[in-house]
Amino acid sequence: MDIIFLDTSIFEANNFLESKRIQEIYKLAERGDIKVVLPKLTYDEIINRISKNIDESSSKFKKYRDDTRILRNVPSISKKLEPFDSDKVKEELNVILKDRFSQSNFEIIEYTTLNIEEIFRSYS
């Protein structure tokens, strides 16, 4: 079994869960063909990037919703344009990602000798 390390940019470029490439990595890891190892720093960075992406998407969605308000008069579309709580969306996606990592047996390596977590968090 090969052990691979992935950077946050790989997850972000592949929309964290959605692309065929990232889905194949999850499947290979789940079957035991590969072992994915992530430092806790990378995991935390993935969570941070999800949060920032949702904030950006929420802002764009609100503008789109305002700019296309006429569509809210159409019953078949109106539900798709309802506002949403960004914090709840972040929580939901974080749970989905955590479950997917667990299902695929990803190994998260904790901070061990130094507590550098606080230092890295200050750069977020």
Image (cartoon, rainbow, N blue to C red):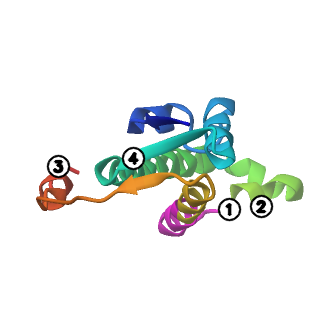
**Residue 93: x %, y % from top left:** 56, 59
Of 109 and 118, which appears nearest the observer? 109
Of 31 and 101, which appears nearest the observer? 31
In the image, what residue type sits under mark 4? Leu
Residue 98 in the image: above or below residue 36: below
Q: Earlier in the sequence, mark 2 or mark 4?
A: 4
Relative horizontal placement of residue 56, taking residue 118 as reference (left or right): right
Q: CA distance from mark 2 to mark 3?
A: 38 Å
The residue labelled by disc 4 is 38
Q: CA distance from mark 4 to mark 3?
A: 19 Å
Q: CA distance from mark 1 to mark 3?
A: 34 Å
User: What residue is at 34 percent from the left and 46 percent from the top?
Assistant: 42
Q: Is residue 93 magenta?
A: yes
What segment carries the magenta color?
A: 83-94
User: What residue is at 51 percent from the left and 46 percent from the top?
Assistant: 57
Q: Nearer the viewer, mark 1 or mark 3?
A: 3
The residue labelled by disc 3 is 123
The residue labelled by disc 1 is 82
Of 27 and 59, which appears nearest the observer? 27
In the image, what residue type sits under mark 3? Tyr
The residue labelled by disc 2 is 79
